[in-house]
Image: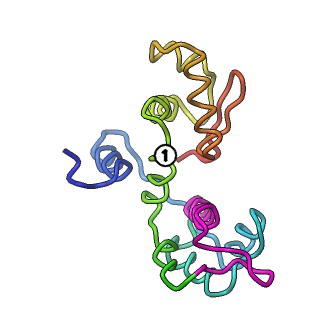
Amino acid sequence: RGGGRPPVRRALERLRDEPGCTPVRLECLDEVALNELPTSLGPASPSRPLLREIRSSTGGNPLHARLLWAHLVETGAAVAQDGHVVLREAGAASAARLGLGDVIDVRLEVLSPTCRDLLQVASVLGPSGDIATIAEVTGTAPDTVAAALAEASAAGVCDAGATRYRFDHPL
């Protein structure tokens, strides 16, 4: 049904045709700021070749750069070596070229279907909110919503507490 396109891409394609949908242009990070972002996230600053790959892949988009950095470090495609983070091997460069939709899809595909469904509702409700509202809107038990958002929080998709959730980026 989706023609093999990732779910995020299909959703974006549908949204582009919606009345009232407005594209948002983001300010891109310059090279200094782009270096500071992954350095602040750790485990070390990126090597120059890795920083070039990140800049090339993300165009300086801060969300894309942060998610790509997390993906590279979490999957072991990039490792700390001699005070910098470097690509583990030449073949890992392809991992550094993932698009924003690809990186988001990778983060979401490990979540349970219930979690993904509830995150879709939460994202429509806004950048932050309370678990009770999601439970009411979806007809799902609050404990189930809380567990799903805790799963998403553990995966780095959102921040979830006992009663509230927050996405760390408006997109």
Please indicate, yes or no, whether residue 28 appears anywhere in the rendered image.
yes
Residue 123 horizontal side relative to residue 153, left or right: left
Q: Is mark 1 on a helix, strand or loop?
A: loop
Q: What residue type is labelled 1?
A: Val
Q: Which residue is drawn at 47% across and 36% down?
A: 112
Q: Position of residue 103 (x, y in %)?
A: 49, 59
Please indicate, yes or no, whether residue 27 appears anywhere in the rendered image.
no
Q: Nearer the viewer, residue 121 or 73?
A: 73
**Image quarter in which the N terminus is found:** top left
Q: Position of residue 63 (x, y in %)?
A: 58, 58
Q: Which of 1 and 134 is in front in this view?
A: 1
Q: Which residue is drawn at 67% across and 26% down?
A: 164
Q: Position of residue 116 (x, y in %)?
A: 46, 36
Its colouring scheme is: rainbow
Magenta residues? Answer: 62-88
Say few, some or many: other residues with alpha carbon within 10 Å of mark 1 (under 14 / 14 to 19 / 20 or more): few
Q: Where is residue 167 in the image (x, y as percent from the top left)?
A: 61, 40
Q: Kindly indicate the quadrant of the structure image that contains residue 80.
A: bottom right
Q: Which residue is drawn at 52% across and 30% down?
A: 122
Q: Kindly indicate the quadrant of the structure image that contains residue 5.
A: bottom left
Q: Nearer the viewer, residue 155 or 168?
A: 155
Residue wearing tag 1: 110
